[in-house]
Image (cartoon, helix red, strand yellow):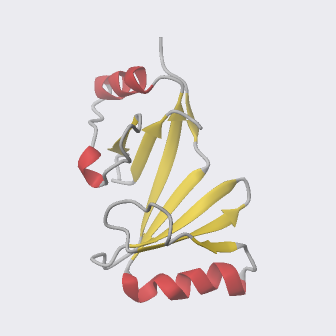
Amino acid sequence: MTPRFEGGRNIAMKLPKARFDAVVAFYRDVLGMTVTDESDADVAAGVAQCASVAFGPVTLWLDRVDNYTGAELWLELCTDDVDAAMAHLAAHGVSPQDELEALPPGSDGHWISNPVMIPHLVRRPD
């Protein structure tokens, strides 16, 4: 049986330190979206600062990563069966890339990348 995949409600934009404040200001001040400072939250390893943007039905996470020189977009895929999803992906030549970013302890998910190397978190929905 082929597992079911659907887009998740989280998108992460990984940003270099030099552009982080300007990107936050763009969403908050130019577009008028609600931006919340998430820096006190338990952010992912390697993320120095974080803000969330109420981006319609999804949350856009703005992650400051100090050793990046350009921005990256990271997406989320939800599935009802992570193990079956990973087996299905492996059968199509897609390998886990869990070295991309550590997941919180107890998380049931894996990182993969699409053919143009956009990271996707494969996980069960909340």
119 vs 35, nearest the viewer: 35
* Image height of 17 relative to 34, above or below: below
Residue 15: quarter of image: bottom left
Q: At which x and y percent is residue 41?
A: 50, 64
Q: At which x and y percent is residue 102?
A: 31, 51
What residue is shown at x 72% (from left), y 80% (from top)?
31
The single residue placed furthest to the top in the displayed view is: 1
Q: At which x and y percent is residue 9?
A: 62, 48
38 vs 112, nearest the viewer: 38
User: In the image, 67: left or right of 76?
Assistant: left
User: In the image, 89: left or right of 32?
Assistant: left
* Image height of 119 relative to 79, above or below: below
What residue is shown at x 68% (from left), y 81% (from top)?
28
User: In the image, 29: left or right of 79?
Assistant: right
Q: At which x and y percent is residue 75?
A: 49, 52
What residue is shown at x 41% (from left), y 39% (from top)?
107
What residue is shown at x 30% (from left), y 22% (from top)?
91
Residue 27: quarter of image: bottom right
Q: How many marks?
A: 0
Of the 4 image quadrants, the one containing the C terminus is top right
The single residue placed furthest to the left in the displayed view is: 99
User: In the image, 58: left or right of 42?
Assistant: right
* Image height of 64 relative to 96, above or below: below
